[in-house]
Amino acid sequence: MKHGKRYLEAAKNVDRSVLYDTADAIALVKKSAVAKFDETVEAHIRTGCDGRHADQQIRGAVVLPHGTGKVVRILVFAKGVKADEAQAAGADYVGAEELIPKIQNEGWLDFDVVVATPDMMGVVGRLGRVLGPKGLMPNPKAGTVTMDVTKAINDIKAGKIEYRLDKTNIIHVPVGKASFTEEQLANNFQTLMDAIIKARPSVLKGTFIKSVTLTSTMGPGVKLNVTKLMS
C-alpha cells in the first residue's frame, strides 16, 4: 500500500521497535494527525481469543467519559409510549414496520446506531442481512435492546461505544478525536481498556491482550507496552 508524503513524514516520528507508554503514544498520535480534518483516534486491540467459540466472544459497550467527538444519529424501533419516550429523549428517527421497506429496498442507512425495544426484535430481525454486516444490529449485551430507551439514547449521545471481536479476533474502537487534549484521550482509552480487561472470557488460557496499537485516521500506528497496561 502506497502512503502519501504526509503519512511518511508523520511515520518518521514513530520508532517501530519501541513499545510506548500510553501518554507518549497519545502525544505521538496527536502529533501525527496532520490531515485537514479532525482525525479520529482509534485503538486496535489484538486478543488471544478465538471468536469461533461462543464462550470466547467479546462484545459489550462502555461510555467514554469525554465522548467520541462524533455526532451520532440514532434510529429507534419502538411503538406507542416507548416511541414517544424515544422522541422525547432526542432520537433522530423513530418508527416500526414502516421502516423495513425503506431500509431494505431503498437502502436508507442515515443512522449510526439502532436501538429497539424487545417486542420489536421480530421486526428488526427481518433486517438482519442489511444491518448485521454493518454492525448495526441491536444487541442486549450492548444495551441497544432495552425497554429503557431514554437511558439507551442518553448513553449513546454521551459517548457510548460498542466493542466486539472482528473475524481476526481484533477489537477496533474510536477513543476520541485528534483535537481532544492528551488527558481526555488518555481517560477515554483507560476507560475502554478497563472494560475490555474485565470482559476477559473465563475459559481463555494464555495471553488475553497480545498487542495494542493507537492510530489516527490517516496517521501511522503506535504500539503500546501491553505489560504496563495490564499491571
Image: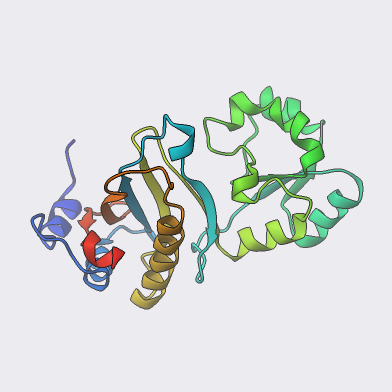
Is residue 184 positioned above or below 208 on the image?
A: below
Whole-percent x, y for residue 229 in the image: 28, 65
- Answer above or below: position of 46 versus 72: above
Quarter-of-image position of residue 90: bottom right
User: Closest to the observer: 227 or 109?
Assistant: 227
User: Which residue is at the front of the view, 44 or 118?
Assistant: 118
Quarter where residue 100 is shown: top right
Between 62 and 24, which is closer to the camera in this rendering?
Answer: 62
- When the figure is inspected, residue 125 is found, relative to residue 212, above or below; the finding is above
- Which one is nearer the viewer's eye here, 170 or 181? 170
Image quarter (top left, top right, bottom left or bottom right) of the N terminus: top left
Q: Quadrant of the C terminus?
A: bottom left
Q: Position of residue 220 (x, y in %)?
A: 21, 53
Q: Is residue 87 left or right of residue 104?
A: right
Taking the spot 36% from the left edge, 65% from the top edge, the residue there is 178
In the image, taking residue 138 as reference, residue 168 lies left or right, namely left
Residue 45 image position (x, y, % from top left): 33, 50
Where is residue 31 shown, x and y percent of the image? Answer: 23, 67
- Residue at horizontal 11%, vertical 60%? 18
Describe residue 48's horizontal placement relative to residue 13 as left or right: right
The colour scheme applied to this rendered structure is rainbow
Number of labels in the image equals 0
- From this view, report whether residue 156 is shown above or below residue 56: below
At horizontal 62% and vertical 44% (from top left) the residue drawn is 111
- Say which residue appears at 19% left-offset and 52% top-offset: 7
